[in-house]
Image (cartoon, rainbow, N blue to C red):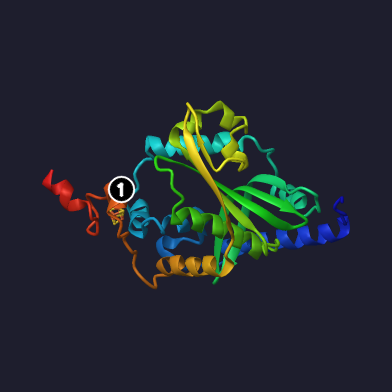
Amino acid sequence: MDAISDPETEGVLARQILERYREAIRASRENEPVLRYGRRTLAVSTLAQQFYCEKAVQFSIERPFAPTAEMQSGTAGHEAVAALGIPMTPEEAVAAAVVERVRPLCVYEFRIGWRHSGVTITGFVDEAWFSGGSVALVAERKFSGSLGIYMPYHVQAGLYCLGLGEMGFGTDSTRYRVSVFKRECHRCERLAAGDCLLLSGEAGQQDCPQGAGISQVFPFEREQTARKLDLAMEFWTGEREAEPTTSPGRCRSCRYRRVCDSSTARSNDVAL
Ligand code: SF4
């Protein structure tokens, strides 16, 4: 059965969503900075990164390094897939998102912003699939040397779902998909053309001559995600200091291991 679209209701919803988004951005500009390092907003990607190692996030601000080749290949892969989308203004994207449809519509690089405990949180969702103002799916893509779906990925995708809900979209039955690609995948023509089965979620695992990857879908857990956000924000509001990871593997591959007092890899470096 076809979905029945009601332009008037959809228009009202789109205006409400856009007004909430603009209000969040406006508040961040008008209010005095209340966060560490004089920040006025927090990015979803940074908040998620705290669940890898908060100490590393702190170092990345206080002692920033130039991006590594690995980081650049991740960005290149990201851009290759984002290029599949049609560029839209926030107004156009929201107008498309509220239309009632039989099949959800995918909007790439969907811009989000909302207020949480007096702080503006912002982000770009890799893929958000909408119908009638509800979010069917949020898809997050990662390029990594390690094919695992780790906590920071869950937090990032969960925060996108949370933010969309706070903006006024329906998220009662939202799910999120995390796809992790090998770094080599960023040069893949099938990926850039949108033909990789991992990208569409048709395959949970892929191993081909160019690269490999995994993809999995999870239900969005609102309460759990909000608790994670509160926990991450305690660092920014100064309620507590940065927590180092307890994972030796993370320290071993961390660029700050030689200067970090908490590094579990530091003693090995000194002995070398
Ligand atoms: S060395 Fe370990 S504890 Fe220190 S910043 Fe890096 S990952 Fe975190």
Q: Find numbered disc 1 in the image and state the secondary structure of the residue it sits on.
A: loop
On the image, the x and y values in percent for residue 269 come to 17, 46
Question: Where is ligand 1, by quadrant?
Answer: bottom left
In this rendering, position of residue 161 left or right of residue 238: right
Q: Nearer the viewer, residue 4 or 36?
A: 4
- Give the quarter of the figure containing the C terminus: top left
The residue that label 1 is drawn on is: 254
In this rendering, position of residue 247 left or right of residue 115: left
Q: Residue at x 39, y 55 (%)?
A: 52
In this rendering, position of residue 83 left or right of residue 70: right
On the image, the x and y values in percent for residue 180 come to 49, 43
Q: Nearer the viewer, residue 269 or 28?
A: 269
- The quarter holding residue 23 reads bottom right
Which residue occupies the extreme left position in the image?
A: 271
Please name the amino acid that badge 1 sits on: Cys
On the image, the x and y values in percent for residue 21 come to 66, 60
